[in-house]
Amino acid sequence: MNRYKNSGGNSGVHAYEIGQDYIVVWFNAGGKSYTYSYGKAGRQHVENMKELAINGQGLNSYIMKNVAKMFD
């Protein structure tokens, strides 16, 4: 698990873990984790989320706008 940098300072994301075809995201609220995979969220969304996670900015917004209900 990697701690999310939260460059914007107001993200709901706490941490993440990147796999080959998935990303697991832990949110501040309740400490719950959600897995987004190629199979459910789609390859492009997962790859976009991986990039945002590594950069430490925009991941929470991306999830809310694009894949909020597409977790495994």
Image (cartoon, rainbow, N blue to C red):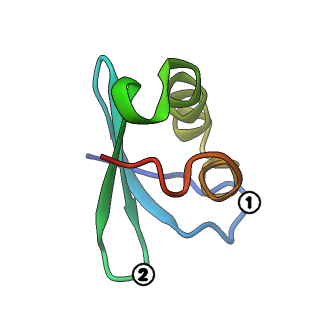
Label placed on residue 8 = 1
Estimate the x, y position of residue 2 in percent, counting from the top left: 33, 45
In the displayed image of the protein, which residue is found farthest to the bottom?
A: 30
Q: Which residue is mark 2?
A: 29
- Which circle, 2 or 1, is nearer the viewer? 2
Q: Amino acid at mark 2?
A: Ala
Please tell me whether mark 1 sits on a helix, a strand or a loop. Answer: loop
Tag 1: Cα neighbours inside 10 Å, few (<14), some, or many (≥20)? few
Q: Is residue 33 above or below residue 5?
A: below
Q: Is residue 67 above or below residue 38?
A: below
62 left or right, relative to 68 = right
Name which residue lies at 35% across and 26% down.
39
Estimate the x, y position of residue 5 in percent, counting from the top left: 54, 52
Q: Is residue 28 above or below residue 47?
A: below
In whole angstroms, how far apart are the C-alphas of marks 2 and 1?
Answer: 17 Å
57 left or right, relative to 40 = right
Estimate the x, y position of residue 30 in percent, counting from the top left: 33, 82
